[in-house]
Amino acid sequence: MKNTINTRYCPVLVTTIKGIFIVAGEYWEKADKNTTVQEVQSRWVPFISEAAKNKKEWSVLSSNKKDTYTVMSMNNKWSCTCWGAKRGVCKHIKEKQKV
């Protein structure tokens, strides 16, 4: 069995004048003419950064109880999809920072 492809991007097959290659971002590997896209993609293990592994996400209900916003925290950087977060730290972020 061939090695796994651990990249951020899903690998594809690319044909050039120099041959057929498996390409995923900066990853290039020579492939033979019988290689299929399904075979290549079955070897793919998506790379997940440490920052993304530490990402936290919550759904919060708005004050009017009609809308739902998403509060996210990654590497101590906070964001929210509400309008208040565009001006700074909103009440939804403050609420989740207490947890």
Image (cartoon, rainbow, N blue to C red):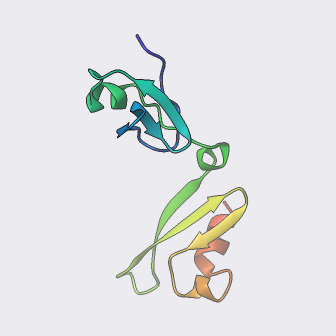
Locate the N terminus by quadrant: top left
Identify the residue at horizontal 68%, vertical 80% (top origin): 89
Q: Is residue 13 left or right of residue 87?
A: left
Q: Is residue 73 above or below residue 20?
A: below
Q: Is residue 94 left or right of residue 27?
A: right
Q: Is residue 71 above or below residue 39?
A: below
Q: Is residue 40 above or below residue 48?
A: above
Locate the C terminus by quadrant: bottom right
In which image quadrant can residue 71 be found?
bottom right
Residue 74 coordinates in the image, percent (x, y)? 65, 57
Identify the residue at horizontal 45%, vertical 38% (top origin): 23
Residue furthest to the right:
76
Q: Nearer the viewer, residue 36 or 69?
A: 36
Q: Is residue 35 left or right of residue 1?
A: left
User: How many numbered circles does the render carry?
Assistant: 0
Identify the residue at horizontal 56%, vertical 74% (top origin): 80
In which image quadrant can residue 84 be found?
bottom right
Identify the residue at horizontal 47%, vertical 23% (top origin): 4
Q: Nearer the viewer, residue 41 or 90?
A: 41
Residue 61 coordinates in the image, percent (x, y)? 44, 74
Q: Nearer the viewer, residue 46 or 51?
A: 46
Residue furthest to the front:
17
Residue 26 coordinates in the image, percent (x, y)? 56, 42
Residue furthest to the top:
1
Q: Is residue 24 above or below residue 88?
A: above
